[in-house]
Amino acid sequence: MPGPNDFGMVWHLGWNHNMREKQKGSRAAGLPNDDIGPDIRLELYRLQVEIRDCEKRANDLFFQNLIKGTSHLSLGQEGIAAGVAVAMQPGDKSFCTYRGHAHTLARGVPMEKVLGELMLRDNGLMRGKGGSMHLTSVEHGVMGSYAIIGAHLPIACGSAWRAQYLGQTDVSVCFFGDGTTNIGAFHEALNFAAIWKLPVVFICENNLYMEYTPIADVTAVEHPAADRASAYGLERIVIDGNDADIVYRTAQAAFAKARKGDGPSLIECMTYRHSGHSRADPAKYRPEGELEKWLERDPIKIYRERLKEFGISDAQVAAIDAESKRKVDAATEVCKASPPAPVELLTTDVYADGGWSWRN
Amino acid sequence: MAELTYRDAVARGIAQEMERDNNVVFLGEDVAKAGGVFKSTVGLYEKFGPLRVRDTPISEQAILGAAMGAAMTGLRPIAEIMFADFAAVCFDYIANEFPKLRYMTNGQLGCPLVVRTGNGGGARFGAQHSQSIENWTMMIPGLKVVAPSSPIDVIGLMAAAVRDDNPVIFHEHKSLYAVKGEVPDGEILDTLGTARILRPGKDATILALALMVPRALAAAETLAAEHGIDCEVIDVRSLVPLDTNTILNSVARTGHLFTVEENPRLCGWGAEIASIVADEAFWDLDGPIVRITTPHIPLPAADHLEDLALPNAPRIVDKIARVMNGSVR
Ligand SMILES: Cc1ncc(C[n+]2csc(CCOP(=O)(O)OP(=O)(O)O)c2C)c(N)n1
Ligand SMILES: [Mg+2]
């Protein structure tokens, strides 16, 4: 397993667009040192493609009025979900946000369970009781998706505290956006995690925008997460979130550190969402050409090139692509055929006795 | 049997549960080495050590968030929010996170934790350190809400709260910490959702909570001695679950209902009970349901003003005597 210094170029250093080019150059001569290996590479690719296809389907279903309420897509941000999830071990815990479909899928939750919840059907993860913003699958380690900005950072600390207290080796991983770094809970959680040396890894997906406002307009520092790290005694880590390899390696090192008892990490992943903030946002506030520039750096495009560099055949790639489309279609059919939840669910699970009674 | 203060009962209740179950952990500001700003957790750190009794930074959101994350993954945390007023700083957890978790996840996750907090007035602390916030928590589906009035209830209800699989907000009353009471030796375990008749009576029912309980009891003695009115005094103890059976049965016997509430008037717990009684026991009533509350004002610091604001025995006596004598309210 590589240590931080083996990829020092992404560790500590500022992130920039040339990074991938540099990396490419270093591999020009036949790529002997594949620290990741073909199996993991294919897994990273498969996850990104499946998340992409599932998110696109969610978008389509939304416009067919089959997904109600809201939904926040991770189109363009798949490299982070895949890179982190592949570095996780069974038993590790994910704490996600409303933009959490990708992270839920990445832990192995079946598409039909996710799409079913988005469609508020009985076959959904929570049978429609939670909705798109609260995807939870405890059996897969997905310990909830939280829709109050920042709330789940302290919660992830608590899960990590439990692991530390009971001597368990799992790591708690908390995903959030750039905008989240400006709420108090972010700062409370980082300090708390640092002083208690908790096995928690904070992953900031910096997609350059909070909802509609550029993060730079409302933040005192250039890198909203990483530039705050030193205030909590943590390393400054900014990486290219659109390169799943880099995400994977960085996450692995952070998890190893957490498992060793050396405390938390805060990783800022630079990325960009291809669609609007939520379902109906046309994202008119973006400067002209910005999306196009980032589409050039589409994580899946980058990864297809990467697979080619490492000699993985077009046929293997095509097979993954086809299987992903088949899975999404099959999942969609299951969801469309699923009824809504029975009305009895309205009043279940308010209290631990399974019911809602507040009086005798 | 020993005489114990309400303050020492808190520590004893927590210790009893920590001894019983290694998964019970306790965190808060100044709670460990210093023994709590109200000295209600003295000795726990020494007894259970730094891994189970933890001082935190001044981070109310981190305290409650960490308690929740630990609770939903297997521990049974007790978290202290020093003054109940500070619940406003971390209300997201109380209103949005703890009580919705089980429902939103369709029962996949639960949140078995206790938040203890120093509630209530009478200590001349002014408007931001004196509030009775039990109604802030009562209104949220998914929470349980407790407010003990005596040392023995502190221990028994604390034990019940820790063992309950739901999030429980445990309101300790700051002005009761010095109050003493008899407490038996050995384990004490009470039941959430049970009110207690502290003084049986036949003419009128008085409901009270926490600091208002001793005041209602004192008022009942005066009403009996000086006005010939025999009041039944019920310590509500638990707002959620609410023991409506005990309340409705009492009203059926007495025909009169009074509530004595420390909270400011609007949406106090008594309003909810008044509505239940009006709905379900209207024909048992022989007079109006009357709520005796703090006026709808912030609490002042000055002693004479604060004393004027909070319901006290003379005010309770005066109000009940006038209503029972059929005079205008
Ligand atoms: C406490 C709180 N304030 C505001 C909102 C409304 N809101 C929802 S998402 C969002 C933007 C969050 O931005 P960021 O953290 O960058 O995440 P992203 O959506 O870009 O993934 C806001 C302001 C909220 N859900 N919670
Ligand atoms: Mg953002």
Image (cartoon, rainbow, N blue to C red):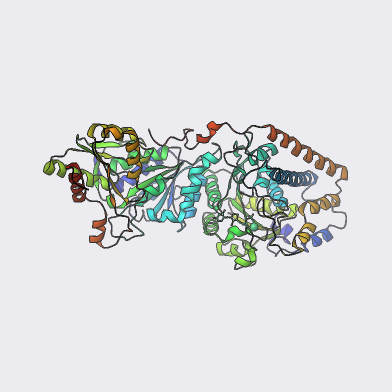
The residue sitting at 61% across, 56% down in the picture is: A265
- Dividing the picture into quadrants, the one containing residue A104 is top right
| Residue farthest toward the left in the current orientation of the protein | B226
Can the viewer see residue A1? Answer: no
Instruction: Indicate the position of residue A143 as horizontal and vertical percent values.
Output: 58, 43
Residue A21 in the figure: left or right of residue A63: right
Position of B183 relative to A147 (above/below): above
Displayed-image quarter of ligand 1:
bottom right
Residue A235 in the figure: left or right of residue B306: right
Instruction: Indicate the position of residue A136 as horizontal and vertical percent values.
Output: 60, 41
- Dividing the picture into quadrants, the one containing residue B138 is top left
- Dividing the picture into quadrants, the one containing residue B193 is top left
| Residue farthest toward the bottom in the current orientation of the protein | A220
Can the viewer see residue B272? Answer: yes
Position of A162 relative to A333 (above/below): below
State the residue in front, B323 or B71.
Answer: B323
Instruction: Indicate the position of residue A100 as horizontal and vertical percent values.
Output: 64, 47
State the residue in front, A190 or A61.
Answer: A61
The residue sitting at 65% across, 50% down in the picture is: A72
The residue sitting at 21% across, 35% down in the picture is: B200
Residue A26 in the figure: left or right of residue B16: right
State the residue in front, A341 or A252.
Answer: A341
Instruction: Indicate the position of residue A55 as horizontal and vertical percent values.
Output: 71, 46
Q: Please identify the quadrant where the C terminus of chain A is shown.
A: top left
Residue A22 in the figure: left or right of residue B4: right
Looking at the image, how many numbered discs can be counted on the residues?
Answer: 0
